[in-house]
Each structure stands twice: as structure tokens, then as C-alpha cells.
Image (tube, helix red, strand yellow):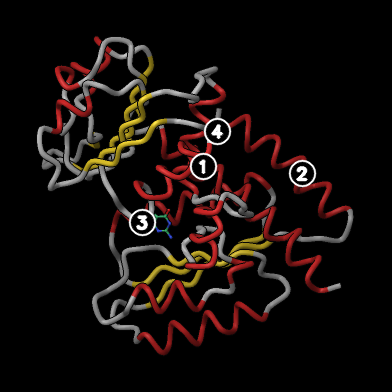
Amino acid sequence: MSKRIKDELKKEAEKLKNSGIVPGLAVIIVGDDPASRVYVNNKKKACAEVGIYSEEYALAEDTSEDELLALIDRLNCRKEISGILVQLPLPKQINEENVIGRIDPKKDVDAFHPVNVGKIMVGNYDFVPCTPAGIMELIKESGIDISGKECVIVGRSNIVGKPMSMLLLHSNGTVTICHSKTRNLAEKTKRADIIVAAVGKPNFITGDMIKEEAVVIDVGINRMADKKLVGDVEFETAEKVASAITPVPGGVGPMTIAMLMKNTLKAAVINNKEDK
Ligand code: GUN
């Protein structure tokens, strides 16, 4: 599915370029977290596949907040840059909220800026946060109707849990958000027609917590001691009860990146309009 989306976006990028609009993405990584490095490499690779110009800024672990904000200011002003992505998490001397708030909302392809978060809440948005957007594509393209369904999200992060709840709600799902203080978690997850697991705990959701025929979306990427990647869902037990389930790796991850490419093309169009 992600490949098909990228193929379509490649054609769209070509059309934009023919009309004089060149989409460009700036990706900033601070420090050398190995997982972030892999994600950033995958994002750059996808840009090359789709035909999006990209620039990488790999900053040292001890970069100050002021230095990072100054870079964002420069990128905000540059015409060749349609989208700006700061890979999270950031080192502790840098305040994430200040950084996200500094990105021009029209170049905020992650949709993390409070202006874009607010637009998502209201239901009138340009950029959809990439992971929840990818999950919506997975669900809808699989022919699964969300309307009226019990949707249970496990995890309340700003990147996944909270925006996911809004997108499912806009599609008329009945949404429950569970988190670390939720009592009787299994009782909630067992009600779900659609479960989105985004807690960051390996094999946290097991088959006995899932209703027969439920749709299971696994957002977790956890690296085990033996270097193996596993999700938040125990795949072996969950696949026996689920009607559909996403694997880790190779499930939600590639869709997230495809949606980032989609947002970057959208940003190129929006910023081009702004210039005129
Ligand atoms: N870190 C983990 N997921 C993401 C994401 O979607 N965007 C950014 N910028 N950082 C992340």
C-alpha cells in the first residue's frame, strides 16, 4: 500500500515540477540516537524515490536551542524548502515545544505545531500527522468501515494517541483513549472493533485482550536485547483472534513515511500559493 501511494505521489511531484513548483523537505536530526538515524535515513530515501528535493541537517548532541531555532528561522524563509521536519526526541537542553512552535505552520509537515493541532481538533486541516494519517489509509484502503465502531487507542501521545483519536472521531468512530493510569485495560480493549496500540511497550497487548475478529493496528517499534524489532502487540497470539493485523516492522512505519511525502507535496502547493 505504501509503495502504491509513493508511486502516485511520484506522478504528482512530476506534475508539480512541470508547473514550476519544486517540493523540498528539510530534515533536522540532533544527536546520534540510532533509531532516529534509521527513521531519518528512511525519510530521505523516500524523498529520493518520490522525486522530492531534500536537505539533511545533522546537528551535534550538544547543539543549543538557540542554534536550532536560528536554523529553523532560516529554513522558514527559504523558497526551496516546502516542509521542515525536526526528528524527535531532542536532547534534554532543547525544549521541544519551543522548537515545534518556531516552525512556520505552513511548513509543518509533521502537523505538530499548535496551529495545526488545533485545526485537526476542529476538523479543518491541511496537514494530518503522519502516523495517524497512515493508519487511517490502512484502515480505509482495507475496506474497513469506521462509522459507529468501538475504537480503542492505547497510548495518549501528542504524536499518535491524541491526533489518532480525532481522526477516528471525524470518521464517526466511538473512541476510547487508554493510558498508563487506565483501570481494567483488558476490559476496554476487549470491547474494541479497532485497536490502535501506541504505548512503546513490547508485546503489551496480548491475544486474550482482543475481541474475536477485531482490527489490530500496531504502532510500537521496540528493539529487544537480541536486536529484534517487536511491536506493542504480541503478534503470535493476536493474529489468531484478529480479522486484520499490521506487522512490525513493515506495517505502520512505511505508511507514516508515505504520508510525510504526501504532506510535503501539499506544503509545496500551499507555500507556492502564499508567494503569489
Ligand atoms: N519521532 C518519532 N516519530 C516521529 C515523527 O513522526 N516525526 C518526528 N519529527 N519525529 C518523530
For the residue pair 29 and 239, the one nearer the viewer reads as 239
Looking at the image, is 148 positioned above or below residue 274?
Answer: above
For the residue pair 265 and 143, the one nearer the viewer reads as 143
| Location of mark 1 (residue) | 133
Q: CA distance from mark 3 to mark 2?
A: 30 Å
* Total number of numbered discs in the rendering: 4
Residue 90 seen in render: yes
Tell me which numbered mark, 3 or 1, is placed earlier along the sequence: 1
Q: CA distance from mark 4 to mark 2?
A: 15 Å
Mark in the foreground, 1 or 2: 1
Mark drawn on residue 12: 2
Looking at the image, is 118 positioned above or below residue 245?
Answer: below
Residue 200 position in % (x across, y down): 22, 45
Q: Quadrant of residue 205?
A: top left
Looking at the image, is 276 positioned above or below residue 111?
Answer: below
For the residue pair 83 and 208, the one nearer the viewer reads as 208
Residue 50 position in % (x across, y down): 66, 45
Mark drawn on residue 2: 4
| Location of mark 3 (residue) | 158
